[in-house]
Image (cartoon, rainbow, N blue to C red):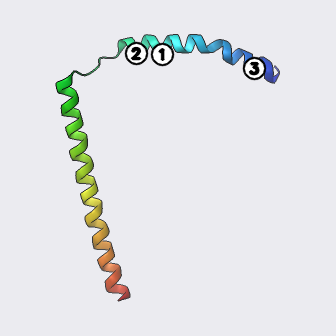
């Protein structure tokens, strides 16, 4: 099969793909406002804690390197 034939076959599959995507999106159970606020809070707190952890780790490694080199 040549390049153009494969390209044409690929483009003929797009409508079926988007139809399948639409069908799957209809099955999704979207969160309500209360759940979304709860999930967002969990994400913000988790990211903050991880950032603090890496900041402290970086500070400690920097101090160790300063002691070795200084």
Q: What element carries label 2?
A: helix
* Residue 62 horizontal side relative to residue 3, left or right: left
Q: How crowded is mark 1: few (under 14 residues within 10 Å), some or many (20 or more)?
A: few
Which mark, by number, is residue 6?
A: 3
Residue 11, horizontal then vertical, whole percent: 67, 16
Nearest to N terminus: mark 1 or mark 3: 3
Q: Quick check: 32 left or right of 5?
A: left
Q: Marks 2 and 1: in contact by CB < 8 Å?
A: yes
- Whole-angstrom CA distance, mark 1 to mark 2, is 6 Å
Q: Position of residue 40 (x, y in %)?
A: 24, 36
User: Is 61 situated above or below 36?
Assistant: below
Q: Residue 58 in the image: x percent, y percent? A: 32, 68
Q: Mark 1 points at which residue?
A: 21
Q: Residue at x 29, y 66 (%)?
A: 57
Q: In which quarter of the image is the N terminus?
A: top right
Q: Look at 25% across and 65% down and name the residue there.
A: 56
The residue where tag 2 is placed is 25
The disc, 3 or 2, on the residue closer to the chain's N-terminal end is: 3
Furthest-bottom residue in this view: 70
Badge 3 marks a residue whose secondary structure is: helix
**Dividing the picture into quarters, in which one does residue 55 lie?**
bottom left
Callout 1: helix, strand or loop?
A: helix
Q: Quadrant of residue 25?
A: top left
Report the residue that reaches farthest toward the right: 2
Estimate the spatial distance between the alpha carbons at disc 1 and disc 3, rounded to whole Å: 22 Å
Q: Is residue 7 above or below residue 51?
A: above
- On the image, the x and y values in percent for residue 67 come to 31, 85
């Amino acid at each position: 099969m040549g390049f153009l034939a494969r390209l044409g076959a690929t483009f003929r599959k797009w409508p079926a793909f988007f139809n399948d995507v639409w069908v799957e999106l209809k099955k999704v159970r979207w969160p309500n406002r209360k759940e979304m606020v709860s999930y967002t809070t969990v994400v913000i707190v988790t990211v903050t804690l991880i950032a603090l952890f890496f900041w402290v780790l970086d500070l400690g490694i920097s101090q160790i390197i300063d002691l070795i080199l200084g």
